[in-house]
Amino acid sequence: MARTALVTGGSRGIGAAISKALKAEGYQVAATYAGNTEKANAFSEETGIKTYKWNVADYDESKAGIEQVEADLGPIDIIVANAGITRDAPFHKMKPEQWKEVIDTNLTGVFNTVHPVWPGMRERGFGRIVVISSINGQKGQFAQVNYAATKAGDLGIIKSLAQEGASKGITANAVCPGYIATEMVMAVPEKVREAIIGQIPTGRLGEPEEIARCVSFLVSDDAQFINGSTISANGGQFFV
Ligand code: CAA
């Protein structure tokens, strides 16, 4: 039977490309979204991928949503923790709410997504966790103390889960996208965006599909020995 994959934030941007790529690979895919029902419905109609609305920042909502996905599609074998937001501001202007919102969604959201599924993966002896981190978790970024903290935190999560899951057939890895042509990056003021593109040796933004291909590989059976790793896909903008 086809494996089941859950992609959080899976109906837009990088997440949508991941959902589509996994479906094309033959997985059963469930995509979550936070608020944009119109876009999520259009995505489902276009792709045939079922979408589920919940707030990843809320543990009980996540747990209930995951139970619904498992009732509909069967046990979740693959998690792609992709849901994320930005609330950019220079640190001297950053409000506690901007810090908290980003931590709750991007970092606690990963806990809330993986934790309810983890016991089942351990019991079944198979699991794939891929967390979508960011170049800005690796190098930091002006106006992103909150976001960079969560994306660096993702790397701590996967390195720890990799050690806990290895003996149970579970791998945990991260992808660190650079600047990808999505709504999130397009929201950066044009002048700043142009300056950033100038720092990318490849000379362009990445495409969501280029990140999706990294995920397809990491969740495959062929990637069993890759655990606790990070794939950087950033056009040469930053090397770890
Ligand atoms: N590097 C250096 N300086 C920067 C900068 C940067 N990346 N971005 C802005 N600045 C400068 C501005 O030019 C400005 O300088 P001056 O005062 O000399 O004019 C100063 O910082 C801040 O200006 P403001 O006080 O007017 O700032 P603001 O309160 O209006 O905030 C901002 C503006 C939110 C910082 C805006 O410039 C911005 O969004 N910057 C981009 C931040 C960024 O790169 N975010 C990444 C989003 S994409 C993403 O997160 C996806 C991913 O994983 C890669």
Image (tube, rainbow, N blue to C red):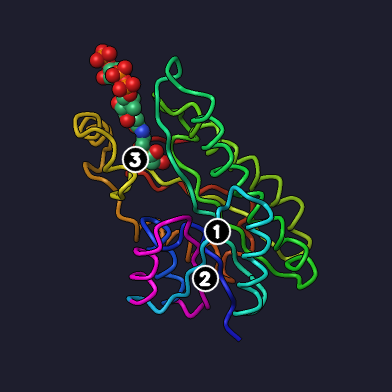
How crowded is the residue under tag 2: few (<14 C-alpha within 10 Å), some, or many (20+)?
many
- State whether residue 19 is above or below residue 61: below
Q: Is mark 2 within 8 Å of ligand 1?
A: no
Question: Circle 3 sits on which residue?
Answer: 236
Disc 3 residue lies near ligand 1 with CB under 8 A: no
Helix, strand, or loop for circle 1? loop
Give the residue type that dot 2 points to: Ala
Residue at image location 39% in from the left, 65% down from the top: 40
Residue 161 in the image: state x and y as whole percent: 70, 50
* Image: magenta residue range: 25-45
Q: Label 1 crowding class (10 Å Cα cut-off): few <14, some 14-19, many 20+?
A: many
Q: How many marks?
A: 3
Q: Is 181 contained in the magenta span?
A: no
Residue at (37% x, 59% y) in the render: 12
Q: Amino acid at mark 1?
A: Trp
Dot 3 or dot 1, earlier in sequence: 1
Q: Residue furthest top?
A: 92
1 lies above or below 169: below
Q: Is residue 32 magenta?
A: yes
**SS for dot 2:** strand
The x and y percentages for residue 33 are 47, 59
